[in-house]
Image (cartoon, rainbow, N blue to C red):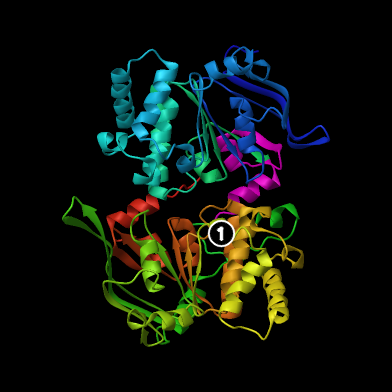
Amino acid sequence: MDTTTLLSLNHVSISFGSKEGYTKVVHDISFQIHPNEIVGIVGESGSGKSVTSLAIMGLLPTKTAKVTGTIFYQNQNILDLEDKGLRSIRGNDIAMIFQEPMSSLNPSMKCGKQVVEILLEHTNLSKSEAKKEVLSLFEKVKLPDTYRAYNSYPHQLSGGQKQRIMIAMAIACKPKLLIADEPTTALDVTVQKEIIQLLKGLQKEYQMSILFISHDLSLVSEIADKVLVMYQGKMVEYGPTSQIFKHPQQEYTKALIYARPSLDVRLQKLPTIQDYLSDQQTNTEIISKVQREQHHKKLYAQTPLLEVKNLEKTFFSKVGLFHKKEFKAVDDVSFQLYEGETLGLVGESGCGKSTLGNTILQLNRANSGEVIYKGQDLTKLTAPQIRNLRKEIQLIFQDPFASLNPRLTIGKAIMEPMKAHHLYANNTERKEKTIQLLERVGLDASFFNRYPHEFSGGQRQRIGIARTIALQPKLIICDESVSALDISVQAQVLNLLNELKDNFGFTYIFISHDLAVVKYMADQLLVMNQGKIEEQGDADRIYESPEKEYTKKLIDAIPKGI
């Protein structure tokens, strides 16, 4: 093996199964990582990215997984090592940052102790030295209050802070190779940018190599020297980042690049990966400025469907025995929403977006202000009146899996709200309607008797949408409804939401921390910061010439690609 290579995968294939038979999920992949180099792996969910990283770490289950080929770390084939040999490499030489920090951290243990544990296991430091080292690591990963973070449980920290704890844990033993598996997927664009800059800085300081895994090509372009594109377990393309971006050779790579909403032009319909791969003519019809102005003239000549006036929502937490601490999650918010409009609501985590959505829905009761829907103030309604209104104002959740009952089939889950609101004469009619809805969102009748765990993330989100539109609502609040989806599935769901809006006359409040997606979807934009509206106006105008520093910061943080 070349001595200048740190890690080398040669003809690696990975299969899962048992004695009865194995299914191959990764097919014959080969690539190298050199010292002090960042290699990005991109591809959709199920393309084999994470499985490949687990094989490098020696973390695949030995009874059900079969790996062929060789994985050389320096001069050792990782696949030949016993548990003891793997443990000496894992943590010391090769470390990993996992995708979901909340499920990777121990919820019953303080964050500082979890990192101390690693240092005590892999080094000869005493407890007090290890604590000192952890506090220094927390400073390196730019945690705002190192002592507070050290003494906090995971649930007491934000998503970005938890991710920094995971990075501190991974670099504790100064590894030569760091594997970062989707380390920024659910984070705000601003936090995402900070994490990318942090990883780049640490890589330079420690002279380590990074294997950076993501489904977002633009993001990978900001950090990687080389990019490997994977699709259905196969290597599609591999080469220097600039070459992959400026001169992609394969249709799949082109599709990945173009499936993300453009920041420069507003397409009638987003091109999906399937459009490219099936050689269909991709729709590149653009909505012109004039068309948009004409649409808005018609839209805003109507009476508002919803008016929010001076809305406030305050939460209280106990501090000591007799004192309460006040936190204003929504602070004097006012706006209007018109029938057929998509209002984008954007801002960082904790800015009050979801609380505002929940307060409009009356899931949180406002402390003051008005929410006037069709001339009626929702804050004055009784509980039974609000229940009746639920039919008209619906919510599409961020995590469709958590919002679906795992014991109910998909058909029953969609029929349930119809039953609750006494829609249609009987279950036969409801079933018929449910099958129509499934077909409407790109699924079919065969899905009716299947359970939520049998579907992919994109399919579950379609089921969530079918359930929401089952009640034929007027207003739909989409709360981060595409944030955890692959770029290609995201394009399909955004196209579907726009199509349903045109066909059924829906009105959307579209909540997201992804400004590129919100700009594509929205007519008007509300930018929220610390409970207040920082800036509001036409989505294109705000993107082209933001007035506030906070909005500029959000726009600057969007990964632009090369």
Residue 426, horizontal then vertical, whole percent: 69, 83
Query: Left or right: 327 with respect to 189?
Result: left
| Residue at the left extreme of this rendering | 322
Asked whether 377 or 272 is in front, the reply is: 377
The location of residue 537, given as percent across then percent down, is 36, 70
Which quadrant does the N terminus fall into? Answer: top right
Q: Quadrant of residue 413?
A: bottom right
Q: Pointer 1: residues within 10 angstroms few (<14), some, or many (20+)?
A: many
Q: Is residue 358 left or right of residue 476?
A: left
Asked whether 473 falls inside the magenta stretch, the response is no
User: Residue furthest toward the front?
Assistant: 321
| Viewer-nearest residue: 32 or 371 | 371
Relative to the observer, which residue lies in front, 13 or 129? Answer: 129
Task: Indicate the secondary structure of the residue bearing disc 1.
Answer: helix
Residue at the (28%, 58%) spot, across then down: 530
Q: Is residue 424 above or below residue 239?
A: below
| First to last magenta residue range | 231-260
Question: Measured along the vertical axis of the image, is residue 302 above or below residue 354?
Answer: below
Q: Amino acid at mark 1?
A: Pro
Residue position for label 1: 400
Rendering coords of residue 49 (x, y %): 62, 37
Q: Is residue 317 left or right of residue 105?
A: left
Residue 415 placement, left or right of 124: right
Total residue callouts: 1
Q: Is residue 320 visible?
A: yes
Whether residue 557 is visible, yes or no, is no
Whether residue 235 appears in magenta in the rendering, the answer is yes
